[in-house]
Image: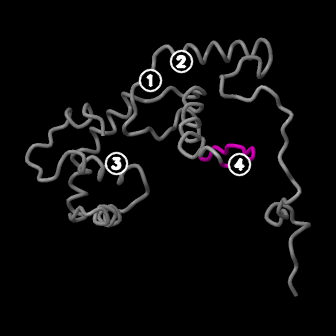
Amino acid sequence: MKPSMTNALSYAGYRFPPEVISYAVWLYYRFPLSLRMVEELLAARGIALTYETVRRWAMKFGLGFARRIRDTALARGDKWHLTQAALACLQRIYRHGYRYQKAGVTLMEVGDRHVQQQDLFAIPPDPRRAGLMAAMDRINRHYGRGTLRTGAEELTADWQMRQDQRSPRYATDWRELLVIR
C-alpha cells in the first residue's frame, strides 16, 4: 500500500497496522468475496480477526478508498497503459534459455470506458498521456488504421494462428453437436 493512501486516513486506535486494514478492505471491495471469506484469507496468512472486524473496517474506510480511486482514475482507452501492463506480465514470466512459441494476448472483461473498476492503489496518470493517445487516434483515423503504433506492437501482420489441433465447435455450431441415443 502506498504511504499516501494510508496516511490520509486515520488508523489511530486500531490494533492492526494500516497495511492489514487496507488489505482487508481492498479484498472485500475488489473481489466478490463475503466478509467470512476475507476473514479466512487473512487467517491463512496468519492474521486472526473476525468477519465483524472486516465489516467495520469496510464501513469506515471503504468510502475513503472509493474517493481516492475516483480521484486517481486512469485515463479511459489508454493503449499505453495496456501495453505497459502486458510488458510487465511478460517480464515476470520470461525465462532465459526456454524455447517459446508465439502466442496471443486475450483481454477479458474489457468494458465501457465510462464504467470501469479502478485499481485501488493506482498512481495518478501522466496528464500528457491523454493528449498523446488522442493524437495517435487522430493520425490513425486520418492515415488509416495501424499507421502509428506503440513500440511494443508487432510491425508485420503475417502471423496466423495454428489451427491443426483446433477443438470442435460443439458449443458454437448446432450442426456439429453430438447426438447421444
**Callout 1 secondary element:** loop
| Amino acid type assigned to the residue bearing label 3 in the image | Trp
| Mark-to-mark CA distance, 2 and 4 | 38 Å
| Mark-to-mark CA distance, 2 and 1 | 9 Å
**Callout 3 secondary element:** helix
Give percent across and percent down for residue 155: 77, 25
Question: In the image, is residue 15 part of the stretch drawn in magenta?
Answer: no
Q: Which residue in the protein does label 3 denote?
A: 26
| Amino acid type assigned to the residue bearing label 4 in the image | Arg
Give percent across and percent down for residue 39: 29, 64
Give percent across and percent down for residue 69: 37, 34
| Amino acid type assigned to the residue bearing label 2 in the image | Ala
> Do the CB atoms of the residues marked 3 and 4 lie less than 8 Å apart?
no
Q: Which residue in the protein does label 1 denote?
A: 125
Of the two numbered discs 1 and 3 on the same chain, state the one appearing first in sequence: 3
| Mark-to-mark CA distance, 3 and 4 | 38 Å
Which residue is at 61% across, 16% downward? 134
Mark 2 or 4: in front is 4
Residue at the bottom extreme?
181
| Mark-to-mark CA distance, 1 and 4 | 36 Å
**Callout 2 secondary element:** helix
> Do the CB atoms of the residues marked 2 and 1 lie less than 8 Å apart?
yes
> Do the CB atoms of the residues marked 2 and 3 lie less than 8 Å apart?
no
Mark 1 is surrounded, within 10 Å at the Cα level, by few (under 14), some (14 to 19) or many (20 or more) other residues, namely: few
Image colouring = one colour
**Labelled disc at residue 130:** 2
Mark 2 is surrounded, within 10 Å at the Cα level, by few (under 14), some (14 to 19) or many (20 or more) other residues, namely: some
Q: Which residue in the protein does label 4 denote?
A: 99
Main SS type for the magenta part? loop
Q: Place residue 105 in its image quadrant.
A: top right
